[in-house]
Image (spheres, rainbow, N blue to C red):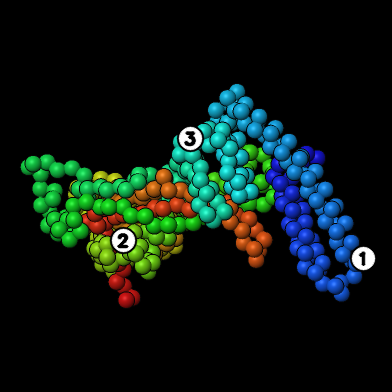
Amino acid sequence: MTVTLYQMKDNLSQVGQELQQVNDEIAMKAGNPSFPDKDLNALSQKADGLENRYNLLKAQVDKKEKLEKNKNKGFINIDPKEKKTHAYAQLIRSVMRNEAPSKEILQVLGDDNGTGDNGTGGQAFLPVTVSNKIITEPLDDNPLRQDETVSGITNLILPRVRFQIDDDDFVNDQEVAKELKTKGDTVTFGRFKTKIKAALSEAILLGTDSALVSYTNAALQAGLAAKEKRVAFAKTPKAGEEHMSFYAKEVGIKSIDGSSTFDAITNAAADVKDRFQNGMKIYMTRPTYMSMIKELVNNSGDLFGKKPEEILGYPVRFNELATEPVVGNFTYAQLNYEIAQTLYEQWKDYDKGINYFQLTAWFDHQILLASAFRLANVTAGK
């Protein structure tokens, strides 16, 4: 069985800690005249044995590191895709050991900013390629990414209205004009911290590069998707995050009533101005949609095989957090990450004994124009 560098360093750390404990015990007991000499000699022999083991392991680690370093130098001869996978896997293993990754690894991953220590046991470095892959690639678990813009721009500022023509009355529309007057002509994206942790077992860490990378990416992306949906459809947003939610009063999305779910949604869609109609979507929960179908079919069952857009006139995205249907043009909402601030660290839950590869990211979700959306409010039974 091949012993990996990670295993060797873990063994070295354990022996080093035990040696330190024995030496501390010798220093404490040696000053106590009542402590038996034979016990003190036994401790001294134990310390000598541990020191010998430590030195042997250290020599093996140094030798293995030299081999790994030479192996990294051979990156140039590896297939580009395999090269990045291997580099990313090595980066994860380095973070989990609380070590700075090699310069070769960072160069392969596209990090031009060097490395540094953030003082918390992790490395404050930015492998740009990795951050872009995790953060900006579409996530199946967050349907908003199909309809909104996802960007990774530092200090992003956008105009609420993307274009204007001299003889166009777009900004003279009463609803839009009122919103611009209240909120301003531009949107400034802020920095809101989120931490996502991927639990990594020894088996995963010691496995193949592709398995480690695939597992870690899937865990981090799933965590980010959950966070993104949570802030966008929060009924009671956290303080300071009110502007991210379609339901927050601060955003000011107009609510349209209807006696049934179908009526509320169709009334809401009809109330949206023509300029926002192209590309409109409906976000709602699957149970709400199925209940609506049951009401409409009146036990005939004919509607169950039809697509939602055939029934409601617009595509439907199912989201378990969209408890009140949201109708609108979701291109007027945007998710932005500050890629340059992404941080990777090792984090351990000592109570559970689980090690985590932790991603700290800064993001913001902005609804550029509330006028492009409506909330479908069902009044029956209220």
- Marked residue nearer the N-terminal end (3 or 1): 1
Question: Which residue position holds label 1?
Answer: 38
Q: Is residue 157 left or right of residue 206?
A: left
| Residue drawn at 35 percent across, 62 percent down | 241
- Measured in 3D between alpha carbons, the distance from the residue under mark 1 to the one under mark 2, in whole angstroms, is 71 Å
* Kind of residue at disc 3: Gly
Q: Is residue 277 left or right of residue 201?
A: left
Pinpoint residue 314: horizontal percent, then vertical percent. 32, 50
Compared to residue 342, the image places residue 182 above or below, namely: below
Q: Residues within 10 Å of mark 1 (few under 14, many from 20)?
A: few
Along the viewing direction, whichever of 29 and 89 lies nearer the viewer? 29
Q: Mark 2: which secondary structure? A: helix
- Marked residue nearer the N-terminal end (1 or 2): 1
Pinpoint residue 96: horizontal percent, then vertical percent. 62, 49
Residue at the extreme top: 77
- The quarter of the picture where the N terminus appears is top right
- Marked residue nearer the N-terminal end (2 or 3): 3
- Measured in 3D between alpha carbons, the distance from the residue under mark 3 to the one under mark 1, in whole angstroms, is 59 Å
* Kind of residue at disc 2: His
Along the viewing direction, whichever of 5 and 202 lies nearer the viewer? 5
Question: Which residue position holds label 2?
Answer: 243
Question: Which residue position holds label 3?
Answer: 110
* Kind of residue at disc 1: Lys
Q: Residues within 10 Å of mark 3 (few under 14, many from 20)?
A: some
